[in-house]
Amino acid sequence: MRKLFIGVATTAVIALAAGCTPATSAQPAGTASGPARDTKSISLFMTHMSNEFTITLSSAVEAQVAARGYQYKVYDAAQDAAKQQTQIEQAVSLGVGAIVIEPVSVDGIVPAVRAAKAAGVKVVIVNQKISDPSAANAYVGADNVATGKAVMDQASADLGGKGDLALLLGPMGSDGQVGRSEGFQKVIDANAGFKVVFQDAANWETEPALSLVENWLNSGKNIDAIISQNDGMAVGAAKAVSDKKLTGKIKIYGVDATSEGLQAVLDGKLAATIGQGTAQQGTLAADAAADLLEGKTVEAETIVPNDVYTKANAQAALDALKK
């Protein structure tokens, strides 16, 4: 049986120790670590701002930061780990009080995270873990291994544990890719009837996924299901499958339960999508940052559970999103 790519940064799936992180006082002016902290400011660092998931997440952070009475700034790293590291360093040098980071890389931004915390900045990681959890004050988000397993479990139930699979992956080395790939593999290993015939990274984007799946379909190899690590890529896969008039014959699965993904489930283009409580992640991450600035104790890790959406329950989820 062919193994899928887990990615180069396997340390992303190191389990975080249970417990709480106590807050410490803001850094006073004149220390060697940098300027005094502005304890009424929170900055958000996003991997990118090019799809519904990241926009929903960032909007939830922004709304809750404002509701808590804090100043707010967002940075877009455009999926560039070096750029995100520079952005974090810049914010620290300007005296930001707390930062919320959706990391581009599990390893690449760790030095900047450590430096920020050492300078007295409160650091909350959201949605995707970093390889050294102790570098931050708290993590809020999904368990990407559990998410990957959940979507593959749904495919296994639908396919009876056998079939030829094609896998659409996120950016290699990101926690989303690493963790979800590990979750995929757990289910594949447990089902001898599964065979991975294609897999490649489409970096969370629709058009690259469309092109990849077109090439796979043109190869002549059999595909029973396409498992995508997010809804954007799943929608691209669905377009390629539709163009070949194979809708319904090849089952497609996504992750994130975006409005686009949920609508595709209702339209019969996707078999299912897995929700990760996107807005809830953002709200809880903002609360963690504000609580730390206010001297409150914050959980070291807060995991938002997964939900499986099929035709049976996708409409209710879509209606809730529209509200």
Image: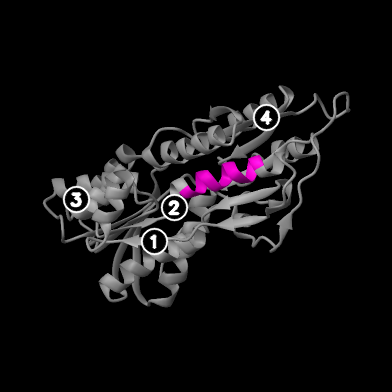
- For label 1, the crowd category at 10 Å Cα-Cα, with few meaning under 14, some 14 to 19 and many 20 or more, is some
CA distance separating discs 1 and 4: 35 Å
Q: Real-space Cα distance between discs 3 and 2? A: 28 Å
Question: Is tag 3's residue or tag 2's residue first in the polypeptide sequence?
Answer: 3
Can the viewer see residue 3? no
- Above or below residue 169? Residue 93 is above
Circles 1, 4 touching at the beta carbon (< 8 Å): no
Q: Quadrant of residue 119?
A: top right
**Quarter of the image that includes the C terminus:** top left
Q: Which residues are magenta?
A: 280-290
Tell whether 308 sits left or right of 49. Answer: left
Q: Which residue is mark 1?
A: 307
Can I make out residue 56 in this image? yes
Q: Which residue is mark 4?
A: 40
The picture places residue 286, in percent across and down from the top left corner, at 58, 41
Q: Given the image, on which type of amino acid does mark 4 rest?
A: Lys
Counting other residues with Cα less than 10 Å from the Cα at mark 3, is it few (<14), some (14-19), or many (20 or more)? many
Pointers 1 and 2 in contact (CB under 8 A)?
yes
Name the residue nearer the viewer: 128 or 259: 259
